[in-house]
Image: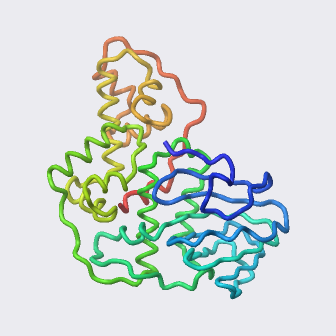
Amino acid sequence: MATAASSNADLGFIPTPDRPCVLTRSIGKGMVGIARVRYELDELGMLDEPAIEDAYLLSHHLSNFHSDIWVDGKRVGKPGQIGGLTTIHDFRHRIGCRMHTAFDTLVFHMPRVVLETVFPESQKEQLEDLRIRPSACLDDPTIAAMARAILPAIERSEQISLLFLDHVACALATHIVAAYGTLAPVKGPGNLAPWQERRVKEMIAARLEGDVRLADLAAECRLSVGHFVRAFRRTTNTTPHQWLLQQRVEHAKTLMRAAERSLADIALDCGFADQSHFTRTFSRLTGISPGAWRRHNGSETIVPTRHADNAAPDYAVAAFAEAG
């Protein structure tokens, strides 16, 4: 499962001071770093200058605030009201920032390699660069919708798998490339070879807890992430994340047939965050609840279920995972 950072020191891509009054919450160590950064007082001052790297930081502003931004020593103009807008910082440039007021921002750290390897199914091109003015504000409804949808996941980061986060990253990268990318033609992929399909399914099945990255699966197939995701979908008619969920459900069926154990224990053994998460996923994929399925197909002795105290929400961001 994804893990939350304990302090700003764990968030190397966010150039904010490690101070108690700077509130942070991050999820995952996957393809894209995701965190919410808040400061509830005024005059935080100059932020640490981020290291030069071939990456972008998408900052979606959840509130209005006042700051000054410099790119390579030149000040960047901003509108007076920036709540709901997005800034794309190009970390290939020197960026300076002074925060004057309290702020609340959702950030996505996106290495350029992610943008270079993730493209829509219809695209047969590769990325050259982004048509943006570094650190200028953009009014992008799609980014805003993704940001709103992923906020609940940040509050329950321990329930989100890295594979799921990587699918979200693919959806966001696909939009960035389609909306702002300058492209050049490239040959598209076909299906996975039989050995590639077999090896990837073995890797996913061996890690039902979901602690596997798209980058690892793609590397095993000797493909880029974007080519791998499209080839997997062409071959299996589903995404790696959905295939993982299907395998969890099949494993749960096996346990329910043979073991006299509670559904809560089975849910954890199959990689689900809790029983409520297991029940929602099982019911969506099979059309019947685990309890009802067990009564028709399970062992004669049924162990009473333990209901979770807090049911995890159905994240609207799940829709974006299908973009892989």
Q: Position of residue 322 (x, y in %)?
A: 37, 58
Q: Residue furthest right?
A: 42
Q: How many labels does the image show?
A: 0
Q: Where is residue 191 in the image (x, y as percent from the top left)?
A: 18, 60
Residue 208 sits in quarter = top left
What sort of colour scheme is used for the picture? Answer: rainbow
Query: Above or below — where is 217 with respect to 68?
Result: above
User: Relative to the observer, which residue lies in front, 216 or 81?
Assistant: 216
Q: Residue sitting at 85 percent across and 66 percent down?
A: 42
Q: Residue furthest left?
A: 194
Q: Residue sitting at 16 percent across and 49 percent down?
A: 195
Q: Residue furthest top?
A: 301
Q: Residue furthest front?
A: 52
Q: Position of residue 269 (x, y in %)?
A: 41, 28
Q: Residue sitting at 32 percent across and 37 percent down?
A: 206
**In-image side of 178 versus 185 (left or right):** right
Query: Above or below — where is 163 with respect to 261?
Result: below
Query: Above or below — where is 269 with respect to 311?
Result: above
Residue 247 sits in quarter = top left
Q: Residue sitting at 64 percent across and 72 percent down?
A: 84
**Where does the C terminus fall, quadrant-wise?**
bottom left
